[in-house]
């Protein structure tokens, strides 16, 4: 294989091979990958876990986020929650394809980002979308935080699921992709449960907490219910930078702060040793 550290050799491959060529793919894989925002933490705020609960859940979390930005630079992603589920239900009943459902999910996650953004507006924290991501370095430097809608902007280009029409890449996957693409420091999912359980603790009293697990172990277990979207596990297996995520219960004050400080608070899912 050519020395991928040589830009000239890599350019030669790009000019002479198809973009699906295995040797070209291997060469690009060994090219140094720049971490764009290595000191930033991505925090995903669940739509159903928090925003759907209203003031009682959201206001304490807003206060904790504002305090946390004193010590950490934050990218805050939002989920779609119950309204997105209602939209998926109606669209599926009407026979809409996956790409259309993806557009609906993006709209609802965007509404949640806007609401959270308004609560943070007086502190100078902006909501970013699309081309607005290009200004992130300045915004994070000036106000140390920004809000974005967690749904990846696939819209009509959303990959088709193996079964059904529900978009497989939703807000958990979107937030994780932001963390991985920017080479961020942390990926923390703020949920309304203490972490990952063997079953859904909301309807199964025998469910037990799993404090730590690898992606391969979790895939092998094939649990019927996961607290994060399954595609995140496949994304983690191929990740270069964000090789672990933590799931915390944000309804318990201080949990997010502790997780940002590097404490093991809820469940840590890791991708294991990088190949």
Image (spheres, rainbow, N blue to C red):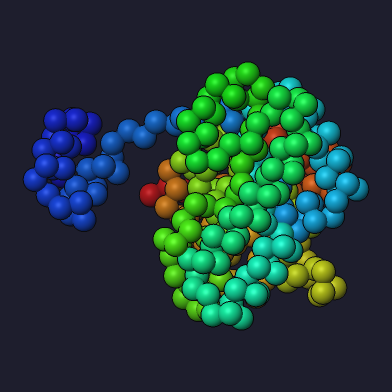
Residue at image coords 50%, 41%: 130
Residue at the image position 64 percent from the left and 36 percent from the top: 127
Q: Position of residue 243 (x, y in %)?
A: 52, 46
Which residue does the image show at 51% across and 66% down from the upper left? 100
Give the left or right position of residue 212, taking residue 256 as reference.
left
Describe residue 114's horizontal placement relative to residue 250 as left or right. left
Q: Quadrant of residue 262?
A: top right
Which residue lies most toward the left here? 16
| Residue at the spot 36% in from the left edge and 34% down from the top edge | 33
Across the whole image, how many numbered discs are drawn on residues?
Answer: 0
Asked whether the viewer can see residue 255, the reply is yes
Image quadrant in which you'd find residue 194: bottom right
Spot occupied by residue 99 in the image (x, y as percentages of width and height):
48, 66
Q: Is residue 80 above or below residue 202?
A: above
Q: Quadrant of residue 76?
A: top right
**Residue found at the very far front of the displayed protein:** 94
Q: Is 90 on the left-hand or right-hand side of 230?
A: right
Residue 170 appears at what percent x and percent y? 57, 59
Q: Is residue 271 left or right of residue 193?
A: left
For the N terminus, the image quarter is: top left
């Amino acid at each position: 294989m050519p020395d991928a550290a040589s830009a000239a050799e890599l350019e030669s491959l790009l000019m002479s091979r198809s973009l699906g060529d295995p040797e070209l793919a291997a060469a690009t894989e060994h090219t140094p990958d720049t971490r764009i925002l290595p000191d930033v933490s991505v925090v995903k705020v669940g739509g159903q876990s928090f925003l759907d609960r209203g003031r009682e859940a959201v206001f304490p979390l807003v206060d904790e986020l504002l305090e946390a930005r004193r010590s950490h630079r934050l990218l805050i992603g939002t989920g779609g929650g119950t309204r997105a589920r209602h939209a998926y239900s109606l669209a599926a009943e009407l026979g809409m394809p996956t790409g259309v459902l993806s557009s609906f999910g993006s709209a609802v996650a965007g509404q949640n980002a806007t609401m959270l953004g308004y609560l943070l507006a007086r502190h100078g924290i902006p909501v970013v979308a699309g081309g607005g991501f290009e200004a992130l370095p300045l915004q994070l430097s000036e106000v140390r935080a920004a809000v974005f809608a967690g749904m990846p902007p696939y819209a009509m280009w959303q990959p088709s699921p193996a079964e059904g029409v529900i978009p497989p890449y939703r807000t958990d996957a979107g937030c994780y992709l932001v963390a991985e693409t920017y080479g961020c420091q942390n990926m923390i999912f703020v949920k309304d449960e203490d972490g990952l359980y063997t079953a859904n603790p909301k309807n199964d009293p025998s469910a037990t907490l799993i404090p730590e697990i690898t992606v391969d172990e979790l895939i092998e277990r094939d649990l019927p219910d996961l607290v994060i979207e399954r595609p995140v596990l496949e994304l983690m297996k191929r990740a270069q930078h964000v090789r672990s995520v933590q799931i915390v219960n944000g309804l318990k004050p201080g949990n997010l702060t502790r997780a940002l400080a590097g404490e093991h608070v809820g469940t840590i899912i890791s991708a294991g040793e990088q190949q």
